[in-house]
Amino acid sequence: MSLLLVILIQASFYALLGMGYVLIYRATRVLNLAHGDLMVFGAFLFFQTLVITGGNLPVSVVAGLAGAAVMGVLIYFGVMRPLAGYPVAVGVLATIALGIVLRSITTFIWSGQTRYPGEYLGPLGKPFELMAGLSISSIDVGIIVAAIIAMAGFPILLQRASIGVEMRGVAENALLAAQRGINIHSINALSWAAATLMATVAGIFFALKVRLGPDIWYVGLAGFAPALIGGMDSLKGITIGALIVAAAEVLASRYIAPQVAMAAPFLVLLVALWIRPWGIFGSREELERI
Amino acid sequence: MSLFTTLPSTLRTSYRHDMQLLDSGFVRFWAAAGLLGVVVLPLLLTNFWTGIANQAFIAIIGALALNLLMGTTGQISLGHAGFIAAGAFTAAALVTHFEAPLIVCLIAATIIGAILGVLVGLPALRLKGLYLAVSTLAAYFVIVVGLGQYQAAISYGAGFTMPPAGILGLTIESERTWFYVLLPIVLGVVLLNVNWLRSAYGRAWMAIHHRDISAESLGINAAAYKLLAFSASTALTCFSGALWAYHTGFVSVEAFDFHMLIQYLAMVIIGGLGSILGCILGAIFVVVLPHLISYATEAVPFLQGMGSQVFELQIGLFGVIMLAFLILEPRGLAGIWARVRFYFQLWPFKYRSWES
């Protein structure tokens, strides 16, 4: 039972992460390998505000999210827009380069040392008993709730809100969307902002739950596994992808070795790519066999 | 289509002449002069810089292997550091368990690499572009974690110390000896790559790069050639990994981190994807740059005493340079070189009307 809970928490975390990958991929067809570093950057912004305000949680969260969104817009206009129209590989390589630039900036500003923002939580951070023998911390509840809100909220946004409809239009056919008067660059920038925002949400949760340091980018990078398994352009696929990856990771960590758990998401991904490259709910038109 | 050709195709009058690598007296003279310059280089350099030159040699082999895959065949690979690790660990394992000599380790690493390349290349038959990139990245993590487990089991996590390399009865101890051992190897690998590119293999790979469906319809077995490209590239990579293990003298999985992956990507991107000259320039650039930066930082008072942070800045600088090349000069250093050469070839004119 507690194992299931751990898997659920981990899956929620992966869903939050995978969301960022899917948002950017849908809009701009770029796999953003800088996602982990964006996550660390946003989490550090949050932490810095936390230190300055002496532990004011709401203000820090807002500051972290706002800073991340601005960062996302800057990255789109500074790096990704000049590269529009290049082969897919160039976009991926650019995000790798972007990632190490971000990582180096983060380490330069905040140094490589590990922080524990969870200390600022006080009594909030203590786990409480859900039922007999099953306890959960408020952070974990937060992760699950955030994941549910995101998983339910984004589809509604995309279906109902006019901005969501514009986003879908750009994702479907950018040229046509532009012809119909949609400003595709602002929509793409918005997608980047939303994705970095999601990265920061995940980053803040991870920082509060475990630790914060430049080395946790690795955790964020693992998020592309659920996104790919679910299907890169499908939001609902992430839920399943996240559950599969989280289950594999938690079970490997419990029954084999913690080090193996680090590779588990990628091992699952390799198998998934081999069996069903376009993902569980992804659209398969892009993949052609030869 | 060769490395040093200067004559336009209209001036080459026979097949033999067309296939000559050094096709004019001018080129022959400067190639000889360049080779002589490289041969006397260790006599001019300090021991430290000779060591860096050796690192550059090994990096050139690795970069050429990566370029074969990414530049020539157009199959993006993000698993390069993992393959280097595989080569280095093959050597380390053979030395630890069987006390195998250098030659055996190099051959074994190459064979293991060829097999590994087929395994990693298999998804490439189904996957393209992004998905292939991701599967190689996933393979990288799996390889590194697997080797980490092996290292923890055999050496209790400490890593493997390599014995001094021995070849033909003599032991390679000093950096200077290494230089003269590596130089012919690198020349051989460069020649191998040049010849690959101008043979049927190279043409098939380039056809697949441009459009695999049309390559297939021209009678090229795209699947077989893709696997061959993966296999050849990974074999060469593992070969360089085994050399790396011997030259460094110590193998531990920590060395093959994401940073090494990025360094090799930086080499081929900064050098210019698809260009052999570019790989050589890029590898030298990436190996030498950190040392130049540390010299520069010693000169700037503001940056003194910030050791680890300067290291971080270096990595960041790689990222900035990579981005700059991707956005501003996608053809890399090789492209800059071609432009400069073109300018001087035509001077005092700006354009020529024959042969683009």
Image (cartoon, coloured by chain):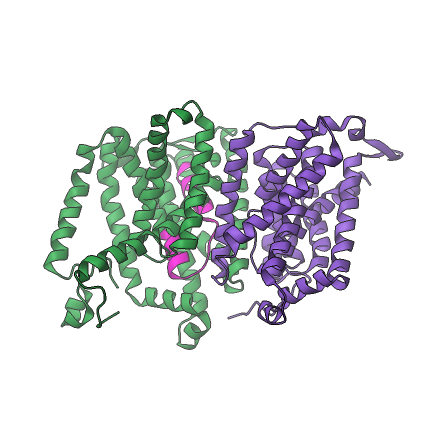
Q: Position of residue A43 (x, y in %)?
A: 64, 37
Q: Position of residue A139 (x, y in %)?
A: 77, 36
The hue of chain A in the figure is purple
Q: Is residue B170 visible?
A: no
Closest to the observer, B185 or B105: B185
Closest to the observer, B19 or A216: A216
What residue appears at the point 27 percent right and 47 percent down from the top-left corner?
Answer: B186
What residue appears at the point 27 percent right and 60 percent down from the top-left corner?
Answer: B195
* Residue B90 against residue B122 in the figure, above or below: above
Relative horizontal placement of residue A235, taking residue B296 as reference (left or right): right
Say whether residue B71 is magenta.
yes
Q: In the rendered view of the protein, which quadrant contains the C terminus of chain B?
A: bottom left
Relative horizontal placement of residue A81, taking residue B176 as reference (left or right): right
Q: Position of residue B182 (x, y in %)?
A: 26, 41
* Residue A34 against residue B199 in the figure, above or below: above
Q: In the rendered view of the protein, which quadrant contains the N terminus of chain B?
A: bottom left
| Chain coloured green | B
Q: Which residues are magenta?
A: B65-92
Say whether residue A235 is magenta.
no
